[in-house]
Image (cartoon, rainbow, N blue to C red):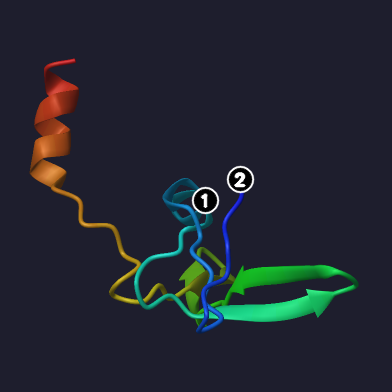
Amino acid sequence: MKTSIDQAGRVVIPASIRERAGFVTGTEIEVTLEDACVRLQRVATGARLVKLGRRLVARPIPSVEARPSVDVAALIEAERHR
């Protein structure tokens, strides 16, 4: 896919790529230059330790914006009628 840079230096990331990368409005990204390539990488959120059995496991803490809005009741009903 091709895109262009506007006069302000902004680049539009195509919607299909944004969706696959999980970039939503307000997502923090890190921009790095590697040789002749520009790399965009989502900034990882912090993690919290959760005890599973006798082990501690690090689980990411998603931001409120990154959490999907899911209607659990609708999912259950859809599964029942499948």
Residue drawn at 53 percent across, 56 percent down: 21
Q: Which residue is mark 2?
A: 1
* Nearer the observer, 37 or 18: 37
Check if mark 1's residue and mark 2's residue have beta carbons within 8 Å. yes
Residue 46 x %, y %: 51, 83
Residue 25 x %, y %: 34, 71
Q: Give the vertical position of 19 relative to 50 (above or below).
A: above
Sooner in the amino-acid sequence: mark 1 or mark 2 = 2
**Amino acid on which the number 2 mark rests in the picture:** Met
Residue 17: numbered disc: 1
Q: How many marks?
A: 2
Quarter of the image containing the N terminus? Answer: top right
* Nearer the observer, 32 or 4: 4
Query: Which residue is situated farthest in the right direction here?
Result: 35
What SS does tag 1 mark? helix
Q: Residues within 10 Å of mark 2 (few under 14, many from 20)?
A: few
Residue drawn at 10 percent across, 38 percent down: 74
Q: Is residue 62 left or right of residue 64?
A: right
Q: Is residue 68 left or right of residue 23?
A: left
Q: Is residue 14 left or right of residue 5?
A: left
Residue drawn at 50 percent across, 70 percent down: 59
* Nearer the observer, 67 or 24: 24
Q: Is residue 19 left or right of residue 74?
A: right
**Amino acid on which the number 1 mark rests in the picture:** Ile
Q: CA distance from mark 1 to mark 2?
A: 10 Å
Q: Give the vertical position of 75 relative to 34 (above or below).
A: above
What SS does tag 2 mark? loop
Quarter of the image containing the C terminus? Answer: top left
Query: Which residue is situated farthest in the front direction here?
Result: 7
* Quarter where residue 42 is shown: bottom right
